[in-house]
Amino acid sequence: MRGESRGFRDGGFATVWVAFAVVLMIGVLGVALQIGSAVLGRQRAENAADLAALAGAALILEGPEEACRRVAELVVANGGRLDDCAADGLDVLVRVSVRAGPFGGRAEGRARAGPVAEGAP
């Protein structure tokens, strides 16, 4: 009887459960990080598109080419890629994408800017 324990013997099951719990927590953390980076990428894309569209709208009277040239400069300065820039009358329409997340995904943002309409609040 020497060396034997008379108390509770778990047979190593606690180690297995702890290892399983750690793997599960790492998986949940990975999913949360991916979702967070996607949301952050979307916000960066929207911000870059908004800023670029406003700058383009300020130059629209100089022509759509000049406005889109400035739009492209600002999008690149904000870490994005200009997917589309177009003029619709005096409005500037911009579509931008940025890298989102560590796995090379892309997030897209769109914006439209132009003069304020009469009677707008």
Image (cartoon, grey):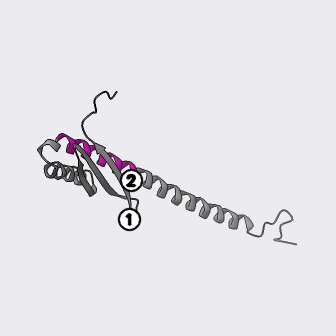
Q: For the residue labelled by badge 2, is the local secondary structure a helix, a strand or a loop?
A: helix
Vertical arrangement, residue 119 with respect to residue 61, above or below:
above
The quadrant the N terminus occupies is: bottom right
Type of the residue with mark 1: Gly
Viewer-proximal residue among 21 and 98: 98
Q: Mark 2: few, some, or many residues within 10 Å (few <14, many ≥20)?
A: many
Location of mark 2 (residue): 41
Identify the residue under disc 1: 104
Q: Which of the two residues, 78 or 54, is positioned nearer the viewer here? A: 54
Position of the C terminus, as image quadrant, is top left
Q: Is residue 88 left or right of residue 64?
A: right
Residue at image location 52% in from the left, 55% down from the top: 32
Q: Eyeballing the image, is 19 above or below 44?
A: below
Q: Position of residue 114 (x, y in %)?
A: 25, 40
Instruction: State the CA–CA distance, disc 1 to disc 2.
Output: 11 Å
Secondary structure at badge 1 equals loop
The main secondary structure of the magenta stretch is helix
Q: Name the residue at 81% across, 71% down.
A: 3
Q: Is residue 44 magenta?
A: yes
For the record, the magenta segment spans 41-58
